[in-house]
Image (tube, rainbow, N blue to C red):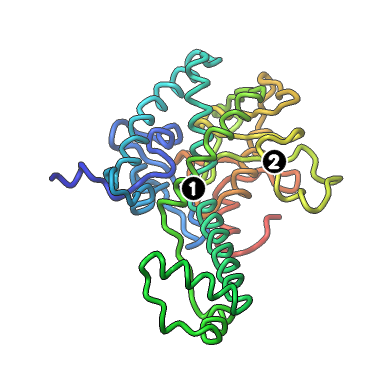
C-alpha cells in the first residue's frame, strides 16, 4: 500500500483553512508561525507543516480502517477553500456556504489538542474516582472481584488492603483510549453547530490599511461581552449556547466572522483598532501557536497598536508590551 494512502500527519486545523492566511499557490502555500512553547518564530513554512499532530484522528476499531476519520474529514475539507473564496468575492454567504462555515467552526471548537488534553484529564480523573470507590469498603471490593471473576478475569491473588493502598497512593497513571476521547469530541459537534445557527453573523473585512487577521491552533474564540459583573464560577467559562457571548472566527487574513445571539457589529466600520483587538483575542486564546500571512499583522495592547515584530520580540524576551 502506498504511504500516502494512510497519512499519519493529521491536521486538526485543516490546510484548506490555513490557505486563507498563506501566500503562494498550490502546494507551495506558506504561513508565518509563532510558537509560544518554544518561543520561536518561523517566518514562512508550508501549511502542511502546521496545525497537525501525528495520528490525531486515528481510531481503534474492529470494523473501521484506523484512518477512516482522517479520510472523512479530508472529504469535507474540499468544501472549505471554495466557500471562503466565494465569500471574499461575493460578500454574504449562501445558505449552503453558511452550513459549511458552521460545520467548520464546530469541528475546530470540538477537536483541538488543548481541549482534547482537558477531556483526557477529566476522563482520567473520573476513572481514579471510580477506583477509589471500588476500594472504599471490603464488601464493595469483593463485589467488584465477583463481577470480574464472572467476566473470566483471574483475581484470586488480589488483596483488599494492598489494592486500597495502591489506588489511594496514585502511584499510577491512566491513559484514556483515544477512540473514546474522539467519540466524545464528535458528540459535541452537532450541539455546537446548533448554537452557531442561532447566532447573527457579521463578516468583517480587513485590507492593507487596517492590517490583516491572524489565526491560531484554537481559532474559534468564545468571549463574554462584559465579564466584569458575572459570578466567579462562570466568568472564565462561557458556553456556546449562553446569551451575552460572542464568537470570533478569523475566516482568512481578510475576513473575520463575529456572531452573537443579540446582534452583530457594523460590517462597514472595520478599522486598524478593531483588527488589532481581534488579533489580541486570537493571541490570548491560542494554545501553543498562531498563524499569519508573512506580510505580518497588527496587535492592540494598552490602547496602542503594535506591529507583530514588536510584540513577538517582547514575547521572546518575556518583556511586557509598553
List x then y, in percent, for residue 95.
Answer: 52, 14
Q: Quadrant of the C terminus?
A: bottom right
Outermost residue toward the right in this view: 229
- In the rendered structure, the answer to whether residue 2 lies left or right of residue 236 reads left
What numbered label is drawn on residue 311? Answer: none
CA gap between label 1 and label 2 equals 18 Å
Q: Nearer the viewer, residue 85 or 127?
A: 127
Name the residue: 53% across, 53% down. Answer: 114
Give the residue number, with chain letter if any, for mark 2.
223
Q: Is residue 58 above or below residue 223?
A: below
Q: In this view of the protein, which residue sits in the foreground, 60 or 70?
A: 60
Residue topped by disc 1? 112
Q: Residues within 10 Å of mark 2 (few under 14, many from 20)?
A: some
Q: Please give the name of the residue rendered at 71% of the width and 21% of the height, measured from the top-left corner.
A: 266
Residue at image x 58%, y 24%? 205
Contact between marks 1 and 2 (CB within 8 A): the answer is no
Where residue 264 appears, as percent x and y from the top left, is: 71, 24
Give the foreground label among 1 and 2. 1
Looking at the rendered structure, the secondary structure element under dot 1 is loop
Residue 187 in the image, given as x and y percentages of width and height: 51, 40
Q: Which image quarter: residue 79?
A: top left
Amino acid at each position: 500500500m502506498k504511504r500516502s494512502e494512510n497519512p499519519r500527519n493529521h491536521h486538526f486545523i485543516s490546510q484548506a483553512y490555513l490557505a486563507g492566511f498563506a501566500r503562494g499557490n498550490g502546494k507551495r502555500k506558506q504561513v508565518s508561525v509563532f510558537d509560544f512553547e518554544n518561543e520561536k518564530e518561523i517566518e514562512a513554512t508550508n501549511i502542511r507543516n502546521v496545525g497537525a499532530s501525528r495520528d490525531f484522528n486515528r481510531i481503534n476499531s474492529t470494523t473501521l480502517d484506523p484512518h477512516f476519520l482522517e479520510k472523512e474529514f479530508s472529504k469535507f475539507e474540499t468544501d472549505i477553500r471554495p466557500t471562503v473564496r466565494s465569500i471574499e468575492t461575493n460578500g454574504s454567504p449562501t445558505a449552503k456556504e453558511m452550513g459549511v462555515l458552521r460545520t467548520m467552526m464546530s469541528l475546530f471548537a470540538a477537536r483541538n489538542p488543548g481541549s482534547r488534553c482537558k477531556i483526557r484529564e477529566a476522563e482520567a480523573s473520573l476513572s481514579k474516582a471510580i477506583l477509589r470507590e471500588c476500594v472504599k469498603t471490603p464488601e464493595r471490593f469483593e463485589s467488584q472481584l465477583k463481577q470480574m471473576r464472572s467476566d473470566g478475569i483471574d483475581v484470586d491473588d488480589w488483596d483488599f488492603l494492598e489494592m486500597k493502598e495502591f489506588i489511594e497512593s496514585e502511584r499510577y497513571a491512566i491513559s484514556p483510549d483515544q477512540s473514546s476521547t474522539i467519540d466524545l469530541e464528535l458528540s459535541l459537534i452537532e450541539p455546537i453547530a446548533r448554537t452557531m445557527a442561532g447566532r447573527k453573523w457579521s463578516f468583517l473585512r480587513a485590507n492593507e490599511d487596517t492590517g490583516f487577521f491572524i489565526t491560531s491552533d484554537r481559532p474559534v474564540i468564545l468571549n463574554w461581552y462584559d465579564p466584569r459583573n458575572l459570578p466567579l464560577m462562570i466568568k472564565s467559562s462561557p458556553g456556546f449556547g449562553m446569551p451575552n457571548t460572542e464568537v470570533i472566527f478569523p475566516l482568512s487574513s481578510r475576513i473575520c466572522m463575529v456572531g452573537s445571539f443579540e446582534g452583530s457589529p457594523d460590517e462597514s466600520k472595520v478599522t486598524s483598532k478593531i483588527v488589532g483587538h481581534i488579533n489580541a483575542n486570537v493571541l490570548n486564546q491560542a494554545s501553543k501557536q498562531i498563524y499569519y500571512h508573512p506580510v505580518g499583522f497588527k496587535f492592540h495592547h494598552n490602547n496602542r497598536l503594535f506591529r507583530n515584530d514588536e510584540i513577538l520580540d517582547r514575547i521572546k524576551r518575556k518583556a511586557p508590551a509598553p
